[in-house]
Image (cartoon, rainbow, N blue to C red):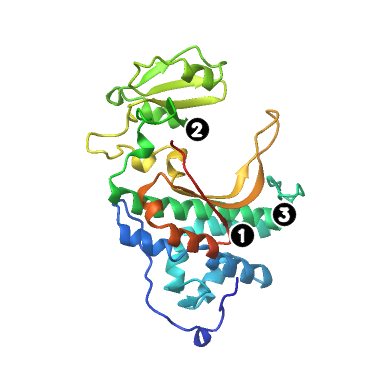
Amino acid sequence: MTALLVFPDKIRYCGPFTIVEEMSEPNHEAGLLRLRHPVRPLLFIVEFIFHTGAFSSVEEVLTLLPNTIETDSATYSKVQRYLQPYLPELEQLTAQKTAENTPYPKIFAANGETLDRAAACSALLTQQILEKELEQINSLLCGTHHCTLCCTGPDADMRQHYFEIPLKLQEEALFSAPALGKIRREGCGQVPLETIANSLDDSCREAVLINHQQGTSLILPRHSNCPALDTTGRCRIYGKRPFVCRKPQIFPYLLEEEPQTTENDGPSFRLRNTLLAVMDCPYVQQLQDEIALYAAASELELVFRRNKA
């Protein structure tokens, strides 16, 4: 990746790009604009300057950035404002410099070698920022298509009998309100999910919240809807939706979490450098070229895949 970085008079301005503020309403054009201006090229610049200069905080680096930056893939204006939403994550760079002896998760390269501290921390930071960026891009693009593919169970033409929404700790409470029509299967905590889900009667048409051997999941049998889906096809809990609901459509797998072999194991990750785009999604089908450009600019290998069949 080549970027023009430090001297404003040497950076050619090719057209306006203004940051899109955080939005709750879908906006296809705003989402497309964000997709065409990925944040990772700017991250390369910020990290390079921070690590090669005598800076005590990442905010010092941001104040030095020119208002407009042109990379190989796009031209960014109002650069400081564009990076501001990611400042909480970028401040980890400052913390890493002042706490060099603190433990950090193990990250393994494709060849099995363990990344050094600097590379591991950079990968963790980038994964977090790309998740945040793509969550908003997905949110802006998704709603305009009025699509509920991620929120409904299989139909009669699909080979699957159910879809699973894995839940993290505390996310189960999102589906506890009686108005959501929750059904719970008790006494299954030591039984594998597949065994329980495959035993559901074909007549089951409502979502089922299951505690199973691997954790807790919301199961959507055939023709069922997520209980958080309202009658207009909108999510009642969108702002607090489960983590897995933020992942579909376009999601970064720069890092993939490795399974823990014992309870005492700390988190570890495998470096994948992959961007997953789910082809079931209408806007992924429509924006394949733009997604490919986003992946290239972010130095990620692009994988198109279908989840439902």
- For this orientation, the residue located farthest to the bottom is 9
The residue at 46%/77% (across/down) is 68
Q: Amino acid at mark 2?
A: Lys
Q: Answer with mark 2 or mark 1, whichever residue precedes in sequence.
A: 1
Q: Is residue 179 above or below residue 24?
A: above
Q: What residue sits right under mark 1 in the picture?
A: 93
Give x and y (percent) for residue 258: 65, 39
Left or right, residue 65 beside residue 34: right
Q: CA distance from mark 3 to mark 1?
A: 12 Å
Tag 3 secondary structure: helix
Report the mark closest to the observer, 2 or 1: 2
230 left or right, relative to 182: left
Residue 234 in picture, x, y percent from top left: 28, 40
What kind of residue is marked 1? Leu
Tell me the CA gap for discs 2 and 3.
Answer: 28 Å
The tally of labels here is 3
Give me the C-alpha separation between circle 2 and circle 1. Answer: 27 Å
Q: Kindly identify the residue that appears in the image at 39 percent across and 14 percent down.
A: 201
Camera-side residue of 65 and 199: 199
Q: Which residue is mark 3?
A: 117
Q: Quadrant of the C terminus?
A: top left
Furthest residue toward left: 232
Residue beneath disc 2: 168
SS class of the residue under badge 2? Answer: loop
Q: Amino acid at mark 3?
A: Arg
Kindly identify which numbered label has been placed on residue 45. none
Disc 1 packing (10 Å; few <14; some 14–19; many ≥20): many
